Image (cartoon, rainbow, N blue to C red):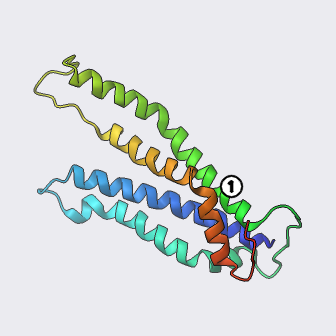
Amino acid sequence: MPLSTIVLIVLRLFCVCWLVDGLTGLAVGFAYYNPQASIIAQLLEPVTFVLFAVVGWIIAPTLSRLVIGQRDAVIQSSELTLGDLYAFAFVFLGLYFSLSSFADTLNWFHYFLWVNAGNRLLPSENAPSYYSLSRALISLIPGLVCLFPGRRWARKLAAADHPSNPNPG
């Protein structure tokens, strides 16, 4: 397997992270939209992340070949397939998002239940902010979505990248 293929997978892994960050920022930006402020100022950063993710995904094959250069080493492994590498990438990404969000999600869910049960920790004129809860959930859900069907997606991506390979993994 060429080293440029491994670099391609890593680049696309970053693109997925940027996409999740951008979509999270857009969700928060629309949830806390301030009509007095410029819409461009409020959404410029998350839109930039989404654009970087999409453009990065598209140019990742070319970029991986540029990073490696003329001497694209071949990694010799009779058991490691492109599908295995994609599966690793999705499982890693799923574990990263799920595990990095689990504690915050659990903590904020408890706080949400506590406040709604009538145990007001804040004065009534101060509404509680659910920004951290929504942020944690928004990263937890894509993490779980990548984790569980990751192997199937890996086979599809491997087949799309190398259609002549009858057994992509």
Residue at numbered disc 1: 88
Q: Residues within 10 Å of mark 1 (few under 14, many from 20)?
A: some
Residue furthest front as drawn? 166
Please give left or right for residue 120 compared with residue 152 in the image.
left
Answer above or below: position of 122 versus 53. Answer: above
The residue lying toward the viewer, choosing from 83 and 70, is: 83
Residue at 47% over, 72% down: 54
Please give left or right for residue 56 compared with residue 79 in the image.
left
Report the quarter where the N terminus lies.
bottom right
| Tally of numbered discs | 1
Under mark 1, the amino acid is Phe
Answer above or below: position of 144 versus 11. Answer: above
Residue at 34% over, 37% down: 133
Q: Residue 152: name its quadrant.
A: bottom right
Answer above or below: position of 89 versus 113. Answer: below
Report the quarter where the C terminus lies.
bottom right
Residue at 65% over, 62% down: 10
The residue lying toward the viewer, choosing from 3 and 160, is: 160
Task: Report x, y in % for residue 81.
Answer: 78, 65
Please give left or right for residue 16 compared with residue 90 in the image.
left
Task: Report x, y in % for residue 5.
Answer: 72, 71
Q: Residue 40: name its quadrant.
A: bottom left
Q: Residue 47: name its quadrant.
A: bottom left
Residue furthest top as drawn? 119
Q: Secondary structure at mark 1?
A: helix
Residue at 48% over, 35% down: 102
Task: Report x, y in % for residue 21.
Answer: 43, 55
Answer above or below: position of 68 versus 33. Answer: below
Task: Report x, y in % for residue 61.
Answer: 64, 77
Please give left or right for residue 93 compared with residue 111 in the image.
right
The residue lying toward the viewer, choosing from 40 and 85, is: 85
